[in-house]
């Protein structure tokens, strides 16, 4: 059974797939993209135990090219 109907490739790696060659992203960018897809503002903050605001996407930005 084929669950995946389509796929998106973003960026490029070197010939050995060891290093990013084009359009690197951070873990914060991946988190921000998931939050954006779920309808959650990636710029949102939540308070830590001391009440300081902590950004939920760790400063990442949604990868707009894969959300289109």
Image (cartoon, helix red, strand yellow):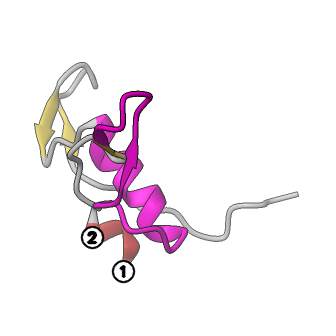
Tag 2 secondary structure: helix
Residues at circles 2 and 1 in contact by the CB criterion of under 8 Å = yes
| Quadrant into which the N terminus falls | bottom right
Closer to us: 51 or 40 = 51
Gap between marks 2 and 1, in whole Å? 6 Å
Closer to us: 11 or 34 = 34
Indicate the position of residue 14 as horizontal and vertical percent values. Answer: 17, 29
- On residue 37, the disc is none
- Residue found 27% across the figure and 70% down from its top: 65
Residue 49 colored magenta? yes
- Residue found 24% across the figure and 38% down from its top: 26
| Quadrant into which the C terminus falls | bottom left
Looking at the rendering, the stretch of residues picked out in magenta corresponds to 27-53
Closer to us: 2 or 57 = 57
Place residue 25 in its image quadrant: top left
- Residue found 31% across the figure and 41% down from its top: 54
Residue under numbered circle 2: 65
**Is 15 rendered above or below residue 64?**
above
């Amino acid at each position: 059974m084929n669950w995946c109907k389509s796929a998106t490739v973003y960026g490029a790696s070197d010939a050995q797939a060891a290093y990013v060659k084009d359009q690197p992203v951070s873990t914060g960018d991946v988190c921000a993209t998931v939050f954006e897809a779920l309808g959650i503002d990636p710029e949102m903050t939540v308070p830590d135990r001391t009440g300081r605001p902590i950004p939920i996407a760790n400063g990442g930005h949604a990868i707009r090219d894969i959300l289109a």
